[in-house]
Amino acid sequence: MGIDLKVKIGSLELNSPLILASGTCSLETFAFLKPEETGAVVLKTVTLKPRQGNPPPRLAETPAGLLNTIGLQNPGVEKFLEHEIDLYPSSYKLVGSVGGETIDEYVEVAKKLEASNRFAAIELNVSCPNVNKGGIEFGRDEMLLLELVKEVRGAVSLPLWVKLTPNTSNIEKIALETSRAGADALVVTNTFVGMAVDIETQSSRISTLSGGVSGPAIKPLALYLVYRVAKNRNVAVIGGGGIFNFRDALEFLIVGAQAFFVGTAMLVNPLAAKEIISGLKEWLAGHGFHSIKEIVGTFREPS
Amino acid sequence: MRSKNKKFCLSKSRVILNQELAQRRFLLRFEAPEIAKKALPGQFIQVKVGGFDPLLPRPFAVSWTENDYIEILVEVRGKGSSLLAKAQEGESFNLLGPLGKGFSLPKGNTKNLVLVAGGIGLAPLRFLAWEASKNGYFITLLYGDKNQSCFLPLKKLLPEKVLVRSIVEEKNGQTGMVTDLLKDVIEEFKDSCFFVCGPKAMLKEVYGQLARKKIVRAQFSFEERMSCGYGACLGCVVLTKKGYKRVCLEGPVFEGEEIIWESI
Ligand SMILES: Cc1cc2nc3c(=O)[nH]c(=O)nc-3n(C[C@H](O)[C@H](O)[C@H](O)COP(=O)(O)OP(=O)(O)OC[C@H]3O[C@@H](n4cnc5c(N)ncnc54)[C@H](O)[C@@H]3O)c2cc1C
Ligand SMILES: Cc1cc2nc3c(=O)[nH]c(=O)nc-3n(C[C@H](O)[C@H](O)[C@H](O)COP(=O)(O)O)c2cc1C
Ligand code: FES
């Protein structure tokens, strides 16, 4: 089928609109992907110093959802670049996800990732709900976020993606300001903060009080956020949250996302990415479309 | 490229047999040729049950393989396992596997193996017993369970040669746990190699007993909440001397010496 899958995120051309979300893929995932059908793979967030992560249990299943409290476990940027990055296949566009507690930390990690010449873009994770410091605070505090984006923008020349938190009431404003500060794309959304209780023990089902909820349970919430952010049309939007099949992906494209990401679906079914792409191609062809771009932003507002 | 080397696969597999072995415990046989070919004792599969609820696949130890077939033993705990227990013969499920790092049989002179099973923890040890007995090892199984009605039919499940000592917690007369059994017999098996699977508290107690007797050759199969089962989410960790390790990828089998037992 002759569907043109290529999309552009700012100046960066991707083979397909499908992006693998940070924290939900590893080396093993690549056995189930094809480079020509994969837009990019965002690797697990790395920080300046190694992080051990939170104690188990780190996962709890909720109806149609997954509650996690991984706590950004990672070996630290130096070890990551020394021991791990070379194991990733070079036939894919890789995106380095950066986390931190201070602006300086973000800047330093971003510079190191850029210097490795292995990345097509940098994603700032300002939205992890599972760490005590940094992360989500940047995502919520506009002034802090603007400063962060400006500083990183000034320090690296790779395309800069900013992954926003849904756990805020003024996402439109945050999105607008972030793009003005130099972000090339906004990634909407990270997990929603939530909790789950074990009724037998009257305690949290994960090792921390709260965690991040992902999966089909958050899809309508994520979709609405993507719609609100994409409406401004001043910056590329990569949308996702609960995408499990090609129909879900189409919804995000229709409300204005230029590309979409898939996370939890890959944990449930490692062939999800492949199945979503073939479903998309078939649907678009069947509906007379020739390219992905034609469906983006076609949403008709209720009158 | 390491990542291209598919060690596990996804297959839609038919249930060939579903048999109630004991109260709330079932044996399921699947037709899964690719998994059957590759699986080693201690490895597990992920079984996808239902659509969005339950959402995540459920991990089960490979308990036996032959030709195109694999078996798992399922204890009914919650939604996923009870749906699986109701599976009809002929019904298909998506299976991912074989996953994880399994047991390794001792090389050299050690020919005596002791398998310590708490309840459904017998599942992976059963596969090990079959492999080990084919390879000329002498096997003793210590098996403890909650009560007589959930007691697994050991004769049916295990090779004849396995020497069995078992115990139930709730019974008139001799009662106790598998760890009490171990206490009674540990002296006889000081030169053996131990393989242990069961609830975490039991693993910890067994490790403690073995450590006090300076028995270091012991492998433990761990359970932890999982989502992907293939190393992608970092959700299923256990604390080791080298930091958190993924139970699904670096485990589920770990050497006793690797684990920080205070964290269990
Ligand atoms: C590597 C591995 C191998 C396993 N092998 C077997 C096996 O051979 N036979 C077997 O019967 N079970 C096995 N289990 C446990 C099995 O995966 C769980 O019992 C099952 O996932 C429960 O699903 P559920 O939907 O029925 O229960 P849920 O509704 O999800 O939970 C019911 C109860 O079980 C507990 N639970 C859920 N998942 C796990 C888990 N992964 N580990 C520990 N407790 C859990 C929950 O805390 C809860 O109390 C294995 C687990 C792992 C990690
Ligand atoms: C287990 C797990 C780990 C995650 N780790 C990260 C992370 O390190 N960095 C990040 O930016 N997002 C992380 N996320 C969030 C996902 O990238 C994604 O934004 C979120 O799960 C919503 O999409 P989904 O419903 O498709 O999974 C993680 C999600 C899960 C489930
Ligand atoms: S279950 Fe995902 S890493 Fe182990």
Image: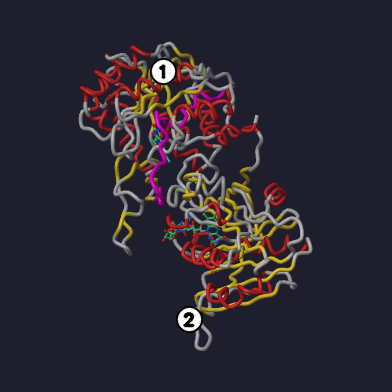
Q: Amino acid at mark 2?
A: Glu
The residue at the point 37 percent across, 46 percent down is A67
Residue B170 - label: 2
How far from the left and from the top, in percent, is residue A113? 45, 21
Question: Quadrant where the N terminus of chain A lies?
Answer: top right
What is the magenta range?
A37-60
Q: Residue furthest bottom?
A: B173
Specify the label residue A111 is tagged with.
Answer: 1
Ligand 2 falls in quadrant: top left
C-alpha separation, residue under disc 1 versus residue under disc 2: 63 Å
Numbered disc 1: secondary structure: helix
Instruction: State yes or no: residue A52 in magenta.
Output: yes
Type of the residue with mark 1: Lys
Q: Is residue B198 magenta?
A: no
Q: Position of residue B177 (x, y in %)?
A: 51, 75
Query: What residue is at 56 percent from the left and 45 percent from the top?
Result: B249
